Image (spheres, rainbow, N blue to C red):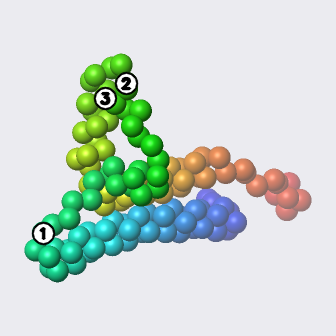
């Protein structure tokens, strides 16, 4: 049976991981909402691929074109151009949330025995 402090720790970890996942879903929904707003305004659906994130954050990805391995270059280019930013945001947030929860619960330091336990 879990100690009250263990249960409290697990509850905190679960709430933090759910917050991370929830924020990523909200970010994805915001991106889709922005696309819907633009579509309603202009009649043209704005595509927001993953590459826009790198452009916006001013990360240089031009080194992909100099790669020697053609297959990997095609895969990376396809992922950057075809993956919707909203899907990427939700997916990465969900993965980070689950990994955070598992890491915290796996590496949890057990309570030291107290004099009452002896």
Q: Nearer the viewer, residue 44 or 11?
A: 44
Residue matched to label 3 = 73
SS of the residue under disc 2? loop
Residue 23 at x, y percent in the picture: 44, 68
> How busy is the neighbourhood of tag 3: few (under 14 within 10 Å), some, or many (20 plus)?
some
Residue 36 at x, y percent in the picture: 20, 74
Residue matched to label 1 = 44
Q: CA distance from mark 3 to mark 2?
A: 6 Å
Residue placed at 53% from the left, 55% from the top? 101
Label located before the other in sequence (1 or 2): 1
Side (left or right) of 18 relative to 37: right
Picture quadrant where residue 66 is located: top left
Residue placed at 12% from the left, 69% from the top? 44
Label located before the other in sequence (3 or 1): 1
Side (left or right) of 8 relative to 102: right
Q: Is residue 32 above or below residue 92?
A: below
Residue 116 in sight in this render? yes
SS of the residue under disc 1? loop
Q: Nearer the viewer, residue 16 or 2?
A: 16
Residue placed at 49% from the left, 69% from the top? 19
Residue matched to label 2 = 67
* Label 3 with label 2: CB-CB less than 8 Å: yes
């Amino acid at each position: 049976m879990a100690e009250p402090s263990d249960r409290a720790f697990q509850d905190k970890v679960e709430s933090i991981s759910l917050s991370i996942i929830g924020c990523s879903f909200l970010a994805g929904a915001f991106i889709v909402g922005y696309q819907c707003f633009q579509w309603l305004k202009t009649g043209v659906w704005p595509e927001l691929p993953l590459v826009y994130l790198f452009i916006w954050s001013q990360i240089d990805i031009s080194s992909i074109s100099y790669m020697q391995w053609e297959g990997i270059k095609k895969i990376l280019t396809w992922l950057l151009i075809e993956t919707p930013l909203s899907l990427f945001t939700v997916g990465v947030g969900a993965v980070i949330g689950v990994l955070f929860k598992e890491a915290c619960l796996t590496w949890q330091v057990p309570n030291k025995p107290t004099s009452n336990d002896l």
